[in-house]
Image: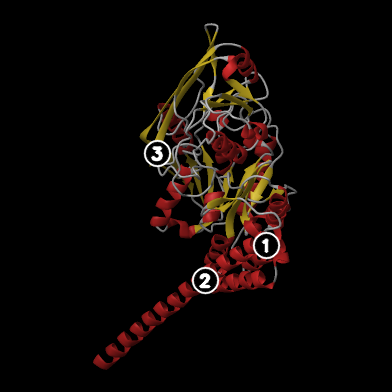
Amino acid sequence: MQLQSILPGSGAEKRAVEHIVSTLRSIADYVSVVDVPVYAWNWRCTVIADGKELPCVLLPYSPPAKLSVRPGNVVSGDLNGLLEANIEGKFVLINYPGRNEELRLAVYLLSRKNPVAVALVTPRSGLLKADVALGTPGYTYLPTTPPSVPVLCVDLEVAKLISTSYVDVEAESNIARGTARVVVAGVNGNSELEVHITSHHDTIIGGIEMTSTNMLLSMAKQLKGQELPVNVTMISYTAREVGDLDLTEYHYTWGERYLLRVLKGKGVLERVLYAIALGPLQSNGELVVAAHPILSKYVEDLHVPVNYNHFLLESHPYMEMGIPALTLMTPNSLLYRNSTHGLGYNQEKQGVLVKANNVISMLLKNVKPSEDWIRLTWRRILNAVDEQGLELRKEVTRLTDIARFHGVINGLRITTRSAYSLVELACTRPFRVYVHSSLFAGLSRSTLSVLEEITSTCNGEVLVGDGQGYRFLRLMHGFKETFSNLYVEYLVKSLKTVVDNEISKAICMLQIARCIELGEESDRNRQVREI
């Protein structure tokens, strides 16, 4: 049995895009489609037991597998135990990790021990899920590889059969260059500035009803006929999890990142005031917002819980570019993405949609550039990292002072782009993973608390990294405090380099402006002399 999906570059995506374009044409002032180059992924997976074919999922970007599995060659257990055991040549069964970052590192560590395959087991019958598995554990924009062993997902009943019966596993996969599509639609407002509202229409498991674009189409109807203070650009993008043509460790939101590159090259992003992303939403969940500080203060007035931006959310690429962004989501909804018990949107339960519409409407009406934006961001940053000493406070203040030189919008972008970061910490024994993204994520109280705990309790390798790179280390006993101090010192020094670079850019801009001014003055003097 092949599960339904809308994969980038597939016929299913082509049909979905046609439906999206047809719907938006009756609402928007313009609709366009942007081609996106992708690595198109196709797969099928079957477990055959007693002549019956049972469904499974081959996780992207796993290699194919054709295995005859006997009970004596199957090992199962918790991750800590399996990492200590000899699993070379074994078929491994392990509970499906609760978070993506746990899955990525677990697959990497297990693959190093050379099993024939790793099967991730969901907790109940009929539940199948598909997160991306890679050959490396980081979240950088460095190239990665597919995992070295097949990684499958099976439900609890199939896992029991594999443990007790002779079964065959047949999994096919194919990856090839293809073309996917992003839909861009606009509703004109009364300003040159614009706000982006983004969603995605692709899914590894499920149909269009399992995507945030399904909600975008419902929300778009609310904009028709409204007098808007800004232009609104609605984006339904592709390649949220699979399709990254660069095949980088941070493979998420490839379609969105590609479109932002195109818009940046055309100078369009200069007009974007902020972005609203429709993240994973469930009809029966409670609305939560992950937001930039200048946007969170507006949302808090509606009594909607606000959290940090998350590296797996659609707001992440905008924040990396310095554009304030927020994601509307429901708690734990990332767990249900790309699963047979997926998100879905129930038309009869519109509580989340109503609340999300209220947030969007309030933001569109009330968010205007303000001189307080940089000061507010400065205060939020200092509140998060204030315990780290005067040196850091000095660099944060220098950064915001330079930002003010560029004006409100550009200055806020410089502050956000320079401060927004991702940090990854992990221990291989006992297994623990922590990935966090926010303004100065590496120096936040939560990050330093986790760092202290990991360095004092880890008996295996410690992973320390960020969006630029990472390293596995073995810490000597008693090195905890020294390592933590070196970690903070390194990040403060990195920030100083960033601020110095921004100062150099500002000086260059002043010099260029002065040269232009002198040139214009010389030209005027020449004209006067000629007269």
Counting labels gives 3
Q: Residue shown at 49%/44% (left/top)?
A: 249
Asked if the residues shown at circle 3 and circle 2 are in contact, with their CB atoms under 8 angstroms apart, the answer is no
Q: Measured from the top left, where is residue 21 in percent x and y? A: 44, 35
Secondary structure under tag 1 reads: helix
Q: Mark 2: give few (<14), some (14-19) or many (20+) Cα within 10 Å.
A: some
Residue 424 visible in the displayed image: yes
Q: Circle 2 sits on which residue? A: 406
Identify the mark at residue 38; answer none if there is no mark: 3
Q: Circle 1 sits on which residue? A: 482
Chain-order first, disc 1 or disc 3: 3
What amino acid is labelled 3 in the image? Val
Q: Is residue 164 above or below residue 275?
A: above
Q: How is the image coloured?
A: secondary structure
Q: Measured from the top left, where is residue 508 in percent x and y? A: 43, 76
Q: Is residue 383 above or below residue 274?
A: below
What amino acid is labelled 2 in the image? His
Q: Mark 3: give few (<14), some (14-19) or many (20+) Cα within 10 Å.
A: many
Secondary structure under tag 2 reads: loop
Chain-order first, disc 2 or disc 1: 2
For the C terminus, the image quarter is bottom left
80 or 99, nearer to the observer:
80
Q: Which label sits in the foreground, 1 or 3?
A: 1
Q: Residue furthest left?
A: 530
**Left or right position of 156 against 498:** right
Question: Disc 2 and disc 1: Cα gap in Å?
Answer: 39 Å
Chain-order first, disc 3 or disc 2: 3
Secondary structure under tag 3 reads: strand
